[in-house]
Amino acid sequence: MNPQLGTLELNPRTGEPFLRLYFHHDIIITPPRWDDAPQFIPYLNDPLVNEWMSGPPVPYTEVDAQNWLNFVKPPADAVLKQLEEAKDQLDSLIIVGHCPVSIIRKVNEDGSDFMIGAVDLIRYGGGEVVISTENPEEYVEYLKNKGENVKINMDRDPGDPEIIWSFGDYVAPAYHGQGIMTDAVRTIMTKWAIPRMNARKITASTFAGNIGSQRVFEKNGFKHIVTLPDYVNVRGNIKTLEIFGWTG
């Protein structure tokens, strides 16, 4: 087995790498698969999911799902290739610029699995908050310089501890209230983002009223940074944004 995989386990039947959740042992997080597209559609057309999301169009179509896969799969594949190319480097685990797993799946007794959600960790592209110049462990609102904030963040080299990352996530309504997303966020942070990406600054944005999502991040050590009233236009509805942050 390639030592550079680190905490990634391998599916004994397919060889696909995955992270297993800490407390939900039948739940894993895998790389995106090209055949995931049809599974996105019912979840992202469900009001219990999409009312809390700003990005996906509604109705959500197979074209939309394929476009999303075209965005998230190549970076994941690139990291896995990078790990394979470094397999003979035995003295230390390499630092990479992306998390190769993001699709949450429930594993059946026969070893097959099915998608129940996603947890994506990407560079923060909002620009609304930055790290305080006075305290490197605190975020501050800095709306007047959003564009430059984003450019600086996107231009940082992989592994730079000053990169601000951002979580985006959802889980199928049938699995709400079971602590799965809290466990998934903790798994991504501690098994991959911190040790393998050198992530030290991570944000998460939720709409006001999405108490479940806010609790997910608070349970993982995130603190509330700022409330931006009537800030986001989501399919004609004006919503207030709550931004949370973690530093480590």
Image (cartoon, rainbow, N blue to C red):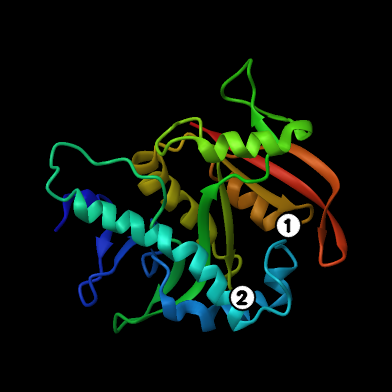
Outermost residue toward the top in this view: 134
Q: Nearer the viewer, residue 74 or 172?
A: 74
Q: Nearer the viewer, residue 22 or 113?
A: 113
How crowded pointer 1 is (Cα within 10 Å; few <14, some 14-19, many 20+) is rated as few
How crowded pointer 2 is (Cα within 10 Å; few <14, some 14-19, many 20+) is rated as some
The quadrant in which the N terminus is found is bottom left
| Residue that numbered label 2 is attached to | 64
Tell me the SS state at disc 1: loop
Q: Position of residue 170 (x, y in %)?
A: 59, 64
Tell me the SS state at disc 2: helix
Q: Is there any visible trace of residue 101 in the rendered image?
A: no
Q: Is residue 38 left or right of residue 10?
A: right
Q: Position of residue 41 (x, y in %)?
A: 60, 81
Q: How many marks?
A: 2
Q: Nearer the viewer, residue 119 or 109?
A: 119
Amino acid carrying mark 1 in the image: Asn
Residue 123 vertical placement versus 143 (above, below):
below
* Residue at screen point 43% across, 32% down: 160
Residue 67 vertical placement versus 192 (above, below):
below
Asked which quadrant contains residue 61, the reply is bottom right
Q: Position of residue 162 (x, y in %)?
A: 50, 30
* Residue at screen point 37% across, 70% down: 26
| Residue that numbered label 1 is attached to | 210
Q: Which disc, if any, is residue 188?
A: none
Q: Is there any visible trace of residue 78 in the rendered image?
A: yes
In primary-sequence order, the first of circles 2 and 1 is 2
C-beta proximity under 8 Å, tags 2 and 1 = no
Mark 2 → mark 1, Cα distance in angstroms? 24 Å
Residue 132 vertical placement versus 44 (above, below):
above
* Residue at screen point 21% across, 77% down: 13
Amino acid carrying mark 2 in the image: Asp
Q: Position of residue 62 (x, y in %)?
A: 59, 82
